[in-house]
Amino acid sequence: MSVRALLARCLAAAALSFCAAASCAPATAGGAAAGTPVLFLSVDITPAAKHALLEREGKAAGFAVRQIEYPLRGAPIEQDPALDRALREAALVWVDIPHATAEARLRPIVDAALRRVGKPEAQVLWIPAGEPAASDRSLRAYLQAGGPTNTRTAFALARAQLAGTPAPDLGPPQLIPQRGIHYPGAPRLFADAAEFRAWAAQQGLRGEPVALLLHRYHFVQGNTAWLDRWLAMFRERGLLAYAAFSGQLSDQPLSALLERDGQVQARVIVNHSLLPQGASLQPTFERWGVPVLQTQPYRQDQAAAWEGSETGLSQADIPFYFAQPEAAGLIDPVVVVAHPKRGEPELIDRQAASVAGKAARWIALQTRSNADKRLVAFVYNYPPGGSNFGASFLNVPRSLARVSEGLKDAGYAVTPKAEADWIAGLKPLLSAYYPGTDLQALLDADQAEALPLARYTAWFDALPAAVRDPMVAKWGPPASSRYVVRQRGEPVFVIPRLKLGALTVLPQPPREETLRNGQDPFMHRSRTPLSHHYLATYLWARQADAILHFGTHGTQEWAPGKLRGPDVWDPVWLPLGDTPVIYPYIVDNLGEALTAKRRGRALMVSHRTPSFAPAGFNAGMAHMHELMHEWETVDPGPTRQGLERRMLQQFVEHNLHRDLGWSAERIAADFSGFLELLHPYLDRLAQSSQPKGLAVFGVVPDEDQRRGSILQLLRVPLIEALGEDIDEAFLINHEGVAKARPARWLDVALKDAQAASQLDLRPSACVAVGTPAAASALGRGGRGETRSSCVGVRVCGCDVHGLDAG
C-alpha cells in the first residue's frame, strides 16, 4: 500500500472516530458532519458568524469543522477531556487569536493538551488578526484574509497539503480593503461614496442616499446576507442605501468615505458599529448636518430570545450601544439583528424595516418645503385637574405662542396664537378626559378629529395576538371605548385637538380611559396595557411629518416594554410608528431625559431651567429667625425663658423639630443644643435655589435674571473664596444680595474676566488694577495706569470705591 493510500485510509478512520465523539464533548459549540475533521479553537469573543463561515465552506469541501470555545476570562482550565479527544481525532487544528489576550488565554490550554495527547505543536495553526502580505499564499494567510472566497481557497489548500500533493495555483489572498462601499449586486467594492453614486447613476439607480456604517470585520467574515436584506428594505422605500465600512470608524476614514467637496454623500446616516471614541466624532457629524441613527445588535442569543426578554439588551451593553453613540450625537437606538450562539446573524425584519421607514421620514423633513409640512404637538394634563396643562418648570401656553410665531416665520402654514388664546382653546379639550364631557359636541364645534373605528380596527387586528390580547382583556374590544361615537352613521374615535393650520396641538391622552381623580394612575405603571383611545390618538397623529412631545414629561416612554432595546410591537414603541419625535425637555433632568431619548425614540431639544434666586424666608420664618438672634443676646432669666417658649411654639408650627429629628420635649430640655443644629440648617434653607417663575421655550431671560441665576450658582464657592463670614442679611435678604461683595465681583467678571481673575478675594487685601476695563469695572475710572483697589475690609491707604463701595 502506498503512503498516500495509507494516509487517506487513516484520515477516513479519524473522521469516523471524530464524528462519533462529537456529541459527547461538553466544551464544544456545535457538532460535526461527516468529512475530514478540523478542530477550530476560539474564545467567546470570536463571532459565531466566523465559525458558521468555516463550517459552511468546509462542508462544501469535504471537511467537518468542529468548534470548541473557551471564555476569554475566568479561572485557568487545567484539563478538558473533550479537547483531548478532539485533538487526537483532528486532522487539522486551527486556533483563532484575534488579539494578545486571546492568545494568552488559549496558549496554555492548547500546549497542555498537546502534551497530554502526544501531538506536536507543529500541527497547530495559530491564526492572528491582521492582514497578510499580498504575496503570502500560506494557509494562515487565506484564513487571516477571511471572507467566503479566501476561506474556500484555504480548504482547497488544506486538502492538497493533507493529500501530499503539490499546492494548486490558487492565486494570492483576496484582501478586503481597510475601507470601502458595499452595495448588493454590484460587481466590486467602491473606494468611496462618490464613486459608488457615479456607478449607481450609470445603472439608473435613483433615490436619496443613505449610508449604513459598519465595521470591516463583517466583510472579512463574509456574513453580509442579513445586511443585503436590510439594504433592500431601504430600496423598497425609494432610498439608495449603501454600506460604508472601515476598520476604524473615526473622522479621517469616515470623511474619506463619505465626503466629496466638503459635502456628505448621504441624507441620513445609520450606524451599526461600536464607536469607542464617540465624542470625537461629534464635530464630524455636526459638520455634516444630517440625522445619524443608532442601531444595535442583540449578542446574547437568537432573535427569539430577544423577543421573549423583559430587559432586552443587558446593562453591560449600555456603555457600548447607548452612551458612546449618544456622546457622538446619535439618536433613536433600535435593535435590528440578533447573533445566535451558532450560525449566521439574524436580521429582525420589523426592527430593520422600522429604521428604514424612519430614515425615509427624516429625509422627507429635509426635502419637503416647510409650507407643506404638518406637525402634531402633545401637551400634558399637568398639574392634575380638568383644565390644567403644563410641564416641569415650563410655561407651556407662553411657549406655544412663541413656537407658533417661530413656525410661521420659518414658512410653516401656521396661524400663531397668543398665550391667552392657547389657554382658552386647550381647556375644553382637557375636560374631555374627565367624566361627563359631551364628546359629540367637540366634534360639532371642530374641536376634535374623527378617526374611523374601521381604520383603527384593521390596524389593530393586524398586530400579533400577544399585543392585542392584554389590551382586550383590560379594556375590552375597540368598539367599547367611551371615545367611540357615531358621525354621519359611522363609528369614530373622538380625538380632542386644537388646529392652527399645519400645527395641531392636543392633550396627550391618559393611558386609562377616563381620569377621575386628576392624576393618571397608570402614568408610570409598566405592566398596564395602553387603552384603545391612546393608540387611536397616536395612530391619527402619525399622519403628521413629526410629533412633538412638549415638555417634561409625557407618558409614552413609560409604557410597558423592554427596558433597553424595545420591540416595535412593545406598547412603549407601538404608538410612535416611524414618525420622527422631537422632545423639548428641561436641561437639568438627565435621568428621565435618557428614558425619553431611548424609549421615546426622540430627538431631544434641551430648554433652560427658570431663573433662580435665594429662597430666603417668609415673614413668619424671618420673625422667628430674629427671635433666635435676640435669644443669643439676652441673659438667662425669665425674659430668655419666655423667648424659648415662643420659639418652641413656632418650631413646632413649622415642623422644624421633625426636620431635625427632635421632639418638643427634647428641645425644651436642651434648647441651646437644638439651636446649634437649627441655625445652620435655616441658613442652608435660606440660601437654597428657588425658581423665579417658569421658563419660556426659545426665550432668553433678561440681564438681571441671568445675573441673578449665575450669582446663585456661584454663591457657595464664591463666599468660600472671599474667606469671610457673610452677614445673614445677605443670605436671606434679596436686596442685600444685589449689593453684597459677591454680586459686585460678578459684575467685574461679566465685564472683564481677566480683571476679575486678578482680584485677590482674601479679606484685608489690596490688588493692583492695571487695565482701563478693570478700573472702570471697579468703579474707579482710569487711563490704564496701575492703581490700588481695595477689596477687603482694610483700606490700605486708598479711597473705598471698589468692591467695598456701598
Image: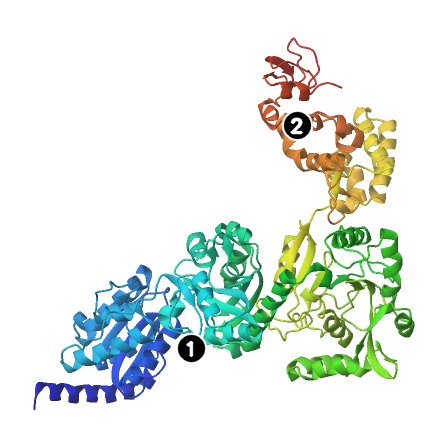
Give how far across and how far down residue 177 sits, in percent.
35, 63
Q: Is residue 459 above or below residue 357?
A: below
Give how far across and how far down residue 58 sits, in percent.
30, 81
- Looking at the rendered structure, the kind of residue marked 2 is Lys
Q: In which quarter of the image is residue 186?
A: bottom left
Give how far across and how far down residue 157 sits, in percent.
21, 77
* Residue 84 appears anywhere in the view: no
Residue, disc 2: 751
At numbered mark 1, what does the secondary structure look like: helix, strand or loop? loop
Q: Dot 1: few (<14), some (14–19), or many (≥20) neighbours within 10 Å?
A: many
- Residue occupying the point 13% across, 78% down: 166
Q: In which quarter of the image is the C terminus?
A: top right
| Residue 454 or residue 210, whichever sits in front | 210
Q: In this view, does 321 lie to the left or right of 635?
A: left
Q: In which quarter of the image is the N terminus?
A: bottom left
| Residue 601 or residue 43, whichever sits in front | 601
Give how far across and how far down residue 323 sits, in percent.
54, 57
Label drawn at residue 150: none
Q: In which quarter of the image is residue 17?
A: bottom left
- Looking at the rendered structure, the kind of residue marked 1 is Glu
Q: In this view, does 168 lie above or below 754?
A: below
Q: Is residue 30 left or right of residue 303?
A: left
Q: How far apart are marks 1 and 2 (CA)?
A: 64 Å
Q: Quick one: which residue is furthest to the left in this view?
A: 1
Residue, disc 1: 344
Q: Quick one: which residue is furthest to the top in this view?
A: 797
At numbered mark 2, what does the secondary structure look like: helix, strand or loop? helix
